[in-house]
Image (cartoon, rainbow, N blue to C red):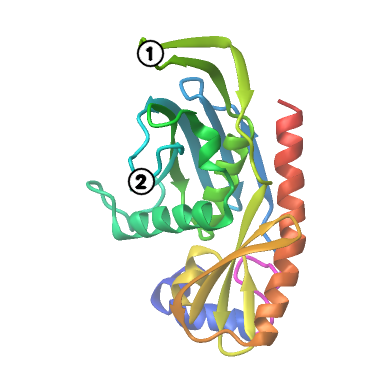
């Protein structure tokens, strides 16, 4: 009868568990779900990775193409993420154009990339004003159960860490381009960045790595981005204010989780 009770009274079902200091999936408030990563999963992509947190699963595929830089940034390349949330990952999404949730998730990932400076876009420039790399990063969620941003950034970092680009020689006089596919080099990264999501219930109740059910009923949600033990970025879209005590507690948990996820990605890359 628990499933029926949960369907009819979802809020009370969750609150009954939280009042007993336990979450519906059996975790403690500050416990994370297990995470796993697999790199080079898609043969058609230049680089790829699958990242899983609990049931939430995201596949990242990166395609590298050549294009002319913009006039505003003539010595920079492009890093373009796109998050896909289809009916495949959850029944709450519908076929058709990108949903509001997908567009918001894409913007959050783009803000993380921009504010954390994970990649120096100048490293993607081949010839100023003439030629630069464009990295299209497609992030497709195939199972959605909360903490999607964490899974998206995890799969993106794993894919970027294994990405290599061929040597490109551009002759400005003849306007010719020569590709040396056998001479490949990795893209310089500023570190392995990870994001850790939190949900706030009441004033002093903090849940780490919330499920979709917990995110839906939370009074506030926020995500902290770390570069191992260094604080990089925080995103909070609204809801109740976060007390200094909860923020301090969340940064401590985020630092520990970041070390674990970074080590997980590093091991997956080394065993490739």
The structure residue drawn at horizontal position 69% and vertical position 52%, both measured from the top left corner, is 34
Q: Is residue 258 left or right of residue 236?
A: right
Task: Check disc 2: other Cα within 10 Å, few if <14, some if 14-19, many if 20+.
Answer: few
Q: Which residue is mark 1?
A: 173
Task: Check disc 1: other Cα within 10 Å, few if <14, some if 14-19, many if 20+.
Answer: few
The structure residue drawn at horizontal position 75% and vertical position 28%, both measured from the top left corner, is 271
Q: Is residue 206 visible?
A: yes
How many marks on residues? 2
Q: Is residue 29 magenta?
A: yes
> x, y percentage for residue 209?
61, 64
Q: Is residue 93 magenta?
A: no
The single residue placed furthest to the bottom in the displayed view is: 203
Asked if 269 appears above or below 72 in the picture, the reply is above
Q: Is residue 29 visible?
A: no
The residue nearer to you, when weighing 241 against 203, is 241
> x, y percentage for residue 253?
73, 68
> x, y percentage for residue 141?
45, 46
| Foreground label between 1 and 2 | 1
- The magenta segment is 20-30
> x, y percentage for residue 7?
41, 71
Element type at mark 2 = loop
Q: Quadrant of residue 173?
A: top left
Q: Quadrant of the C terminus?
A: top right
The single residue placed furthest to the front in the displayed view is: 173
Asked if 142 appears above or below 204 in the picture, the reply is above
Mark 1 and mark 2 lie on one chain; the one further toward the N terminus is 2
The structure residue drawn at horizontal position 34% and vertical position 39%, both measured from the top left corner, is 70
Q: Which residue is mark 2?
A: 72
């Amino acid at each position: 009868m628990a499933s029926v009770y949960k369907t009819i009274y979802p809020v009370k079902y969750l609150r009954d568990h939280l009042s007993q200091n336990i979450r519906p999936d059996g975790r403690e408030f500050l416990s994370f779900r297990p995470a796993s990563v697999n790199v080079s999963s898609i043969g058609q992509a230049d680089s790829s990775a699958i990242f899983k947190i609990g049931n939430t699963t995201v596949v990242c595929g990166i395609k590298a193409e050549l294009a002319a830089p913009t006039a505003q940034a003539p010595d920079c390349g492009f890093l373009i993420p796109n998050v896909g949330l289809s009916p495949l990952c959850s029944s709450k999404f519908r076929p058709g154009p990108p949903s509001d949730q997908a567009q918001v998730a894409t913007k959050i990932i783009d803000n993380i990339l921009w504010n954390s400076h994970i990649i120096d876009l100048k490293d993607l420039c081949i010839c100023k004003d003439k030629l630069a790399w464009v990295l299209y990063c497609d992030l497709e969620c195939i199972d959605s159960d909360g903490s999607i941003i964490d899974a998206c950034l995890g799969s993106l970092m794993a894919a970027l860490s294994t990405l290599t680009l061929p040597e490109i020689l551009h002759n400005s006089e003849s306007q010719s381009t020569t590709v040396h596919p056998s001479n490949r080099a990795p893209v310089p990264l500023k570190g392995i960045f990870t994001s850790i999501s939190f949900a706030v219930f009441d004033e002093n109740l903090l849940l780490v790595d919330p499920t979709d059910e917990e995110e839906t009923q939370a009074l506030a949600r926020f995500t902290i981005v770390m570069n191992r033990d260094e604080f990089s970025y925080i995103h909070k879209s609204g809801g109740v204010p976060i007390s200094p005590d909860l923020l301090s507690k969340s940064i401590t948990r985020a630092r520990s989780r970041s070390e674990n996820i970074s080590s997980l990605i590093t091991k997956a890359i080394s065993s490739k």
